[in-house]
Image (spheres, rainbow, N blue to C red):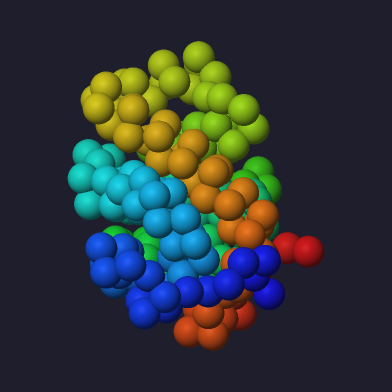
Amino acid sequence: MARLPYLNPEDLAEADRPLLKRMITLHRCLVNSPGAARAFSGLGQYIRYGAKLDPRLRELAILQIGWLARSPYEWSHHIKIGHDFGVTDADIEALIAETAGQPNSLEPLAKLVLKATREVHAGGMSAETFAELQVHLTNEQMVDLTVTAAFYCAVVRTLASLAIDVEPDYQPYLDRFPLPA
């Protein structure tokens, strides 16, 4: 159960109501601070719709953070969103295997993106991994990948700290791809 109330549009000033155009529990809790919700949403929207990183690779990076953080909310939401951007069930199974150091079907660039994301999650991408990625990605894509991984580290910590509930519509994704205990 969330540690703060889930608000509805009628609980907000008229100018803040657009913050709840998606009535997901994360947004409904964040609007307890409309300014923070607006800033949070702005970067999230850029990552999803403006970043130059390949959308499938972006979603794999986000899923990697959700998996590492054992975040039911992030993991379930981005399985669904990932499907919308080309992530397959086979990709998700391969991400789980890759994280465990097991053989999998991911192509080398996806594996490298996941490695970089794991390093960001652990504190920062190594110079070696950064250099390897620069062979494949533009400077803009490098920044977009780094910001995506770092932002989603913040997202999973926000979700955990506020104890945001997973909506029932997303439970089937957790059932299909359960997080480890």
Q: Nearer the viewer, residue 22 or 29?
A: 29
Looking at the image, residue 76 sits to the left or right of residue 80; the answer is right
Residue 96, image x, y percentages:
60, 56
**In the rendered view, would you say 7 is above or below 60?**
below
Residue 150, image x, y percentages:
49, 36
Q: Report the residue at 39% width, 50% height from top.
A: 35
Residue 11, image x, y percentages:
42, 75
Quarter of the image that includes the C terminus:
bottom right
- Which image quadrant for residue 2? bottom right
Q: Nearer the viewer, residue 94 or 118?
A: 118
Q: Report the residue at 56% width, 25% height from top.
A: 124
**In the rendered view, would you say 16 is above or below 125?**
below
Q: Is residue 78 visible?
A: no
Q: Nearer the viewer, residue 95 or 161?
A: 161
Quarter of the image that includes the N terminus:
bottom right
Q: Is residue 164 visible?
A: yes
Q: Report the residue at 62% width, 49% height from top.
A: 157
Q: Report the residue at 59% width, 37% height from top.
A: 121
- Tag count: 0
Residue 41, image x, y percentages:
35, 53
**Residue at the extreme right:** 181
**Residue at the extreme front:** 13
Q: Nearer the viewer, residue 56 or 107?
A: 56
- Which image quadrant for residue 118? top right
